[in-house]
Image (cartoon, grey):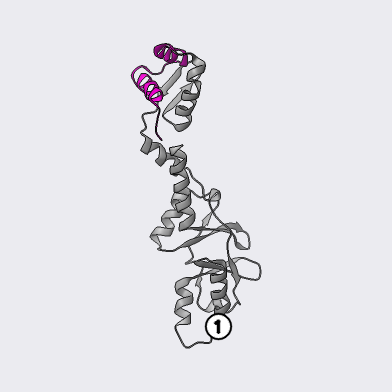
């Protein structure tokens, strides 16, 4: 986030003499309190300053990089996940391959008759199955899928950074976003590397405004 010269002046004053009231900052700059109000609001919302009633403004001591880092650490999965693509466990490998290409995804989530998560299919799983001499129309996906408890997943209220680490550490393209039920895990979304990338790009763009 690029600060204006006046905002830089405000920061310098608060760093040197904070806590200090808005009126005193305005006097130092020979401006009215109303003129400074938007600048003070921006600096406070961005996290450079904090304010306390009847005390005034004070410097938080955080750099721009630290403030961006703080924001990243607060992002939740629920803000960025997308619609899941699921298939039934009795679907053939051939049909699963078709679904993957038609939906343009790299991971399919396999569910049972109760629509509960029981497996995950990656591109590698389907490629491996198609390289043999098997009849792909006759092989059900439950034969080749990765099963619980080996499946990595996340929940809506998990931190995005924690889910991102799961993607990296396990070298996978997507996580099912699940809701825990008494009968099992319901798939409510998917979190991909693309979702994570979009989140970070949006955050950087918001800092440039």
Q: Which residues are magenta?
A: 1-30
Disc 1: CA contacts within 10 A as few (<14), some (14-19) or many (>=20): some
Give the position of the N terminus as an image quadrant: top left
Quadrant in the picture for residue 88: bottom right
Residue 9 magenta: yes
Q: Nearer the viewer, residue 198 or 165?
A: 198
- How many numbered circles does the render carry? 1
Q: Is residue 48 above or below residue 199?
A: above
Residue 109: quadrant of the picture: bottom right
Pinpoint residue 56: horizontal percent, then vertical percent.
45, 18
Q: Which residue is mark 1?
A: 139
Task: Indicate whether 137 appears above or below 71.
Answer: below
Viewer-side residue, 111 vs 36: 36
Rendered residue at 54%/75% (across/down):
97
The answer to whether residue 38 shows anywhere in this view is yes
- The residue that appears at 47% across and 40% down in the rendered structure is 206
Which residue sits furthest left?
A: 16
Q: Is residue 144 above or below residue 148?
A: below
Whether 27 is among the magenta residues is yes
Q: Main secondary structure of the magenta part?
A: helix
Whether residue 73 is visible here, answered yes or no, is no
Q: Residue at x 51, y 50 (%)?
A: 158
Residue 163 spot, x, y in % from top left: 46, 54
Q: Is residue 107 above or below residue 10?
A: below
Label 1 sits on a secondary structure element that is loop
Position in image of residue 44 (x %, y %): 46, 27
Residue 36 position in % (x across, y down): 47, 19
The image quadrant that residue 141 belongs to is bottom right
């Amino acid at each position: 986030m690029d600060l204006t010269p006046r905002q830089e002046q405000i920061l310098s004053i608060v760093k040197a003499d904070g806590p200090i009231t808005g009126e005193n900052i305005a006097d130092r700059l020979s401006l009215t309190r109303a003129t400074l109000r938007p600048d003070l609001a921006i600096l406070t919302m961005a996290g450079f300053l904090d304010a306390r009633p009847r005390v005034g403004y004070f410097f938080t001591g955080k750099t721009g990089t630290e403030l961006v880092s703080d924001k990243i650490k607060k992002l939740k999965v629920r803000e960025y996940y997308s619609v899941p693509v699921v298939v039934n466990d009795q679907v053939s490998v051939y049909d699963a391959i078709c679904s993957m290409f038609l939906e343009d995804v790299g991971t399919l989530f396999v569910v049972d008759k109760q629509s509960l998560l029981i497996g995950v299919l990656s591109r590698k799983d389907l490629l491996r199955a198609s390289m043999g001499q098997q009849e792909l129309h006759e092989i059900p996906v439950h034969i080749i899928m990765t099963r619980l408890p080996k499946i990595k997943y996340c929940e809506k209220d998990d931190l995005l950074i924690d889910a991102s680490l799961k993607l990296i550490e396990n070298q996978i393209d997507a996580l099912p976003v699940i809701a825990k039920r008494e009968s099992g895990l319901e798939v409510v979304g998917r979190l991909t590397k693309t979702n994570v990338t979009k989140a970070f790009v949006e955050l950087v763009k918001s800092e440039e405004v």
